[in-house]
Image (spheres, helix red, strand yellow):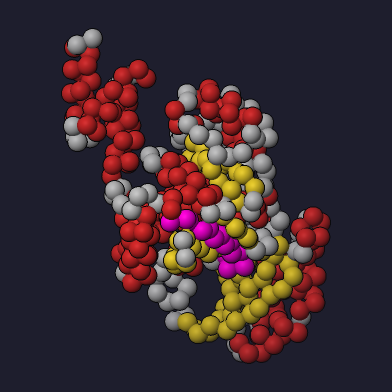
Amino acid sequence: MSDISGLHKMNVKQRREVIASRSNGAYWSDLDTGGLTMDVADRMIENVIGIISYPVGVATNFMINGKDVLVPMSLEEPSVVAAASKAAKIARAGGGFIAEADEPVMIGTVQLVDVKDVYEGVKNIMESRKEILKMANEMLPEIIRNAGGVFDFEVKPLYTESGNMLVFYFYVHVLDAMGANTVDTVAEGIAPFLAEKSGGRYLLRILSNYALKRIARATAKFPISELGKNGEDAAEGLIHAYNLARADIFRAVTHNKGIMNGIIAVANTINNDTRAIEAGAHAYAARSGRYMPLTDYRLEGDYVIGKIELPLQVASFGGSVGLNAVNKIALNIMKNPGSKGLAEIMASVGLAQNFAAMYALVTEGIQSGHMRLHAKSLAISAGATVSEVDEVANRMVREKSVNFDSAKKILEELRAHS
Ligand code: MEV
């Protein structure tokens, strides 16, 4: 079960024991070190001089498609894990999240320039359909080919400031990978043939992060009875908040940023390409020509119904997934969902995160909860030891003065009196 009460009150060792007893097992010692060895780090990027770590937390209470899921999350920002867990608890009372994701299909592109007659080029490429699909699939590992491989393509003329050109889009089933390597290999492999057929030459050969064939959706019924004693007001407030995001880009961007707090935090635990996820999500938010919220809300009877829909180009395998030992632990905690299952979890977390932020904003505001946690980080930065942190943080919150100078002052006073 994922509805573990009081996880936040346990120490790290106790939490690990509880999480281990409810997941597929894990090598917890890797969580002490951040999971990345210097040897691996030195091969991951260039000019390596070290490793930076982030905390890994676990969000509780998620029930997705009738199954309990514990969700590992990693980010630098306090409150996010607590907020996701809180919203998941409310959603759970309404039956949890119902989520679904498209098949993991990525889009590759090849740019064809100096095409003398774009219509002739399109015609020649379309007439070579069988050959192109065959050639593209021959470049793929058998396992991807068997899953569907490159199964379709389109070609589009574009009239640009540097003249007419063609863009060739092809669609690849990438199984549990994000797909960048697979797609780029095919793009580079088929480009010369496409160029020949188009009567021009190829230039860019790269996947598109506008992963429109890889949409994930989640919905949840948040019972108004779970929204505190002024639940009706909170529910009405949520709809006002949502409509502000629909009407005003300044709010919509922040609304969507809150969604990405959850999604990216999960992605971080499994070395997924967070820039790709962000780029795709924000482009999708603007697909109508106007930047809009990625979630939808409406009141229906005793519930606030929340929905989210966005492209999620996520991987449970391949690329950098697994280079950090924590990736495996995180996947185990989620019971190894595969890329589709992962997209369903991330969409649900995004919705939960957004609901929690809006609920806080329309009730007590975001700062009180945030400040309680922020105070702890400040206390640590000011030099508080494990036994001093809570006292320093609590005093800052009580005195409504949560900042570094206060943390230092309180710590000095505390030590002077002990
Ligand atoms: C902070 O990281 C995220 C929020 O600003 C999101 C929102 O306003 O909806 C709280």
Q: Residue at x 72, y 83 (%)?
A: 126
Q: Is residue 2 visible?
A: yes
Magenta range is: 211-224
Compared to residue 377, the image places residue 148 above or below, namely: below
Secondary structure predominantly adopted by residues drawn in magenta: strand
Quadrant of the rendered image containing residue 121: bottom right
Note whether 30 is above or below 259 in the view shown. above
Q: Viewed as shown, does residue 239 lie left or right of 174? A: left
Count the numbered circles shown.
Answer: 0
Residue 88 coordinates in the image, percent (x, y): 50, 48
- Specify the quadrant of the image occupied by residue 240: bottom left
Relative to 294, residue 159 above or below:
below
Q: Nearer the viewer, residue 245 or 283?
A: 245
Q: Residue at x 58, y 40 (%)?
A: 2
Point out residue 316 in the picture as x, y percentages from the top left corner. 65, 47
- Residue at 67% from the left image edge and 43% from the top image edge: 336
Q: Is residue 73 shown in magenta? A: no
Q: In the rendered image, is residue 265 in sight?
A: no
Seen at 77% across and 72% down, the residue is: 133
Q: 35 or 405, which lies in front?
A: 405
Q: Is residue 319 left or right of residue 388?
A: right
* Quarter placement of the C terminus: top left
Q: Residue 188: give x, y in percent of width and height.
A: 66, 64
Tell me residue 191's x, y (percent).
67, 70
Of all residues, the one furthest to the top in this rendering is 418
- Residue closer to the observer: 397 or 112: 397
Q: Quadrant of the N terminus?
A: top right
Residue 212 on the magenta span: yes
